[in-house]
Each structure stands twice: as structure tokens, then as C-alpha cells.
Image (cartoon, rainbow, N blue to C red):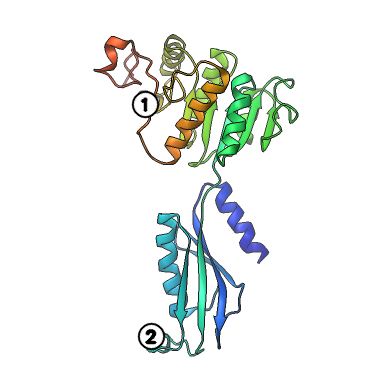
Amino acid sequence: MGDLFDEVQKLKSEGKKGALATIIGTKGSTPREVGAKMLIREDGTLLGTIGGGCLEAEVWQAAMNIIKEQKPRTIHFDLTGKQAEEGGMICGGVMDIYIEPILPAERVFVFGGGHISLFVVKMAKMVGFEVSVIDDRPQFANPERFPEANEVLAEEFFLAFPKLKVNPSSYVVIVTRGHAYDQEVLEWAVGTKARYIGMIGSRRKIQTVYESLVAKGISREKLEAVHAPIGLDIGALTPEEIAVAIVAEMIQKRRKTGKGKAYSCLPESEKASKPRKEFDLPDLKE
């Protein structure tokens, strides 16, 4: 059983999905007892058993649907009927099996330990994200300042990068104290598989950072996928309000909805004709 739960944690940490099937009720003669479990990975492979045969085949099919739907379900199996007999299951009992989705842990990597980060961390934890805080200043990156964070790293950003397990369920929030640091983090972030990358800053600062990265060979497509300025456009002014806008945008990404209005870096006269992330960047060389 230990191996099974270790595998569940491994799936979550790697950003992968699965489903866990558990026998929660039996009556009569059944192939396994209450509590028996089987893990179904999203690639279809299995770990553990709940009885084999047509029973596991049906559970496998149900689990694949549950992984897609991301909703748990309880399934009732009657092992006394003709179908069970044809499948070679002659136990003669009934079973209830609870199948729950195993979803990746959603972690936010917050770069910068300033005032905005304080509230981003609090709110992100409130809505179910795990949080890592990274800053090169120990006075701004410590457990006392961020008691809610799952992880706090006080070291140079480039030293922290290899330690961060970024996967397709990860979110990167860039709110450092200067554009040089923002650029360093963004250059790293666009090379990861992060689901969401957001960077704070004015249009002028963002364009300066983008131009520098394009000159270094970063593709326009990768930069256009970045949420910059970060957060939904709710007219936020204070650190608390800006944090609300940032976390709201992450929730929007999580729920796969585009109903909120994002910030635009373009002048008012250009907003109607251009998408929000079109910058006047130099053409990339072929």
C-alpha cells in the first residue's frame, strides 16, 4: 500500500493525473476485501488490484472518464450475473467501488518577497494553491514573513531555478524589485512547462524586457503567452487589490474561462484594433 500512495504523490508532484479506485463495500463472496485499492494512471497503466478480470476492465474505463471529468463517482458491481460468469468471475458477491480523480498539485512560484507577494501568498493559499516564495534577500524571504508558504527560498534566483519542480500545473508570478531581476526570471520561466506566467510592470518596462529577450533569441510566441502586466483589469491600486487581480487571473486560468478582462499594455487608441500582448518588438531573424 505504501508504494501505491508514494506513486500518487509522485503523480501529483510531476503534474500528472490519475484515478484511485477503492472498494468501499462488499456483500457475499468477492475477490478483494473492503479497502483494497488500485491506481489508474492517465496513460492507462495500473498499480495494485481490486480483483482482476472484467471488474478491473470496467473500473479502468470508468476511471479514464473520471480523470477527464475530474469528478469522483461510486460504481456498483454485481458479480452474481451472467456478465460476471462470462468474465470468469465466479465469486458471487456484490461490490461498491469509489473512484476519485488524482489531480496534479497546483503550485505558485512567487518571485519577489515584497508587499504584493505577501497578499498573493495569503490569497493563493486560501483558494487551494501550494506556494513557493523566492527572493535573494533573506530579510524578505523567510518563514516568519511568509508563514503560509509551503516553501521559502532565500538565494540568488539563478541558483534557485534548478531546485524548482515546474510542471504543466505550475504558475509563475514575477513581482521582483526591478526589471533586471524580472527579465532574469522571465527568461527562465518561458523555458519551463508552466501553465501560467505573469509579470508585473508598466508597458514601457515590459517592452524593454521583451526587446532584450527577443535579442537573446526568445521567441515572440513565448512572450505573447505571458500575462503582462499581470492580473485582471479591475482598477487595482493597493498591494492588496493588485494581489486580488493576480490571483483572480490565476483562477481564470485554472477554470479555463476567458470572461475576465485582462490588463492592456497598449494606449487606449490602440486597444480596439490590437490584442493586449502585441508589442513593438523587433522582427525575429529566420
User: Could you tell me which residue is drawn at 41 percent across and 88 percent down?
Assistant: 81
Which residue has dot 1 on it? 261
User: Could you tell me which residue is drawn at 56 percent across and 76 percent down?
Assistant: 25
Asked if one can make out residue 155 in the rendered structure from this viewpoint, the answer is yes
The image shows residue 91 at horizontal and vertical percentages of 51, 89
| 141 displayed left or right of 130 | right
User: Residue 180: which numbered mark, if any?
Assistant: none
Front-lying residue, 258 or 134: 258
Which residue has dot 2 on it? 83
Above or below, 7 relative to 201? below
Disc 1 is placed on an element classified as loop
Front-lying residue, 255 or 175: 255
The image shows residue 72 at horizontal and vertical percentages of 48, 60
| 274 displayed left or right of 263 | left
Quadrant where the image shows the N terminus: bottom right
Badge 2 crowding class, 10 Å Cα cut-off, few under 14, some 14 to 19, many 20 or more, is few
Quadrant where the image shows the C terminus: top left
Residue 285 is drawn in which quadrant? top left
Tag 2: amino acid: Gln
